[in-house]
Amino acid sequence: MIGIIGAMDQEIKAYLGLAQNIKEIVWHNIVFYRATLCNKEVCIVKSGVGKVLSATICQKMIDEFLPSTIIFTGVAGALNSTYNIGDIIISTDLMQHDMDATLLGCKHGQVPYSDYHIFKANSNLVDISKTIKVEGHSIHFGRILTGDTFVSSQDSKRKFFIDELKGDAVEMEGAAIAQVCTLNKIPYVVVRTISDKADGEACENFEAFLPQVADNSSKVVSQLLQKI
């Protein structure tokens, strides 16, 4: 079984529209959808926004449904100036930009008193993704930064994210999913479509383009499922 997680309704809507044999399993107010998608057995769930919710739902999925692979999907803001709205970024690695224990001698993004710092996505899933194409848009491979902050040009750390942390895109769940999957030794990859450029128009662009660009992620994930 392959787990597919998105933070918002719009980020899993396309998958549910394409899936067959859907069975709902409700845990508290969270609905897990067991289904068939691209001839693969899948479990689809909306995690909610932020690191705590996404990590909680990811661990519940692992415990309950035993996925062999997890794909986190949805949208992100671009930090890399070459990325355009509608383009896709596939994670080579991820880092928590709001994990800062540098005063304790840790690297920025490092979980204190541990080796957890930069989480590398599964290389096989990344390699398979390099064979995927989406008409009219580019697919990029890079570093995704995660934190419980919606980033715009007004964010004082935006330049730091780009220059020091070498981030290509920023969002609010991916590195939390990566840490949970790493702890559980489950292959994972994060597939994000650029909904905004994390700049002064980020809020407006995010709201305007979310429904449209979320579908681009589903096109990539559907091709990935066929090739796994």
Image (tube, rainbow, N blue to C red):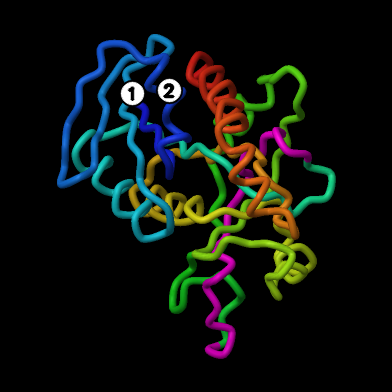
Q: Is residue 122 left or right of residue 63?
A: right
Q: Which mark is residue 42?
A: 1
| Residue at x-position 31% and y-position 28% | 43
Residue 143 seen in this snapshot = no
In percent of width and height, residue 100 lies at 55, 78
Tag 2–tag 1 contact (CB < 8 Å): yes
Name the kind of residue labelled 1 in the image. Answer: Val
In percent of width and height, residue 56 lies at 29, 54
Q: Which mark is residue 15?
A: 2
Q: Which mark is residue 201?
A: none
Residue interval drawn in magenta: 84-104
Name the kind of residue labelled 2 in the image. Answer: Tyr
| Residue at x-position 21% and y-position 43% | 63
**Dot 2: element:** helix
Q: Is residue 4 left or right of residue 136?
A: left
Q: Residues within 10 Å of mark 2 (few under 14, many from 20)?
A: many
In percent of width and height, residue 18 lies at 42, 14
Quadrant of the rendered image containing residue 52: bottom left
Q: Is residue 112 left or right of residue 192?
A: left
Residue 93 seen in this snapshot = yes
Instruction: Say if the magenta span includes residue 89.
Output: yes
The residue nearer to you, when weighing 196 against 119, is 196
The residue nearer to you, when weighing 10 against 37, is 10
| Residue at x-position 37% and y-position 51% | 54
**Dot 1: element:** strand
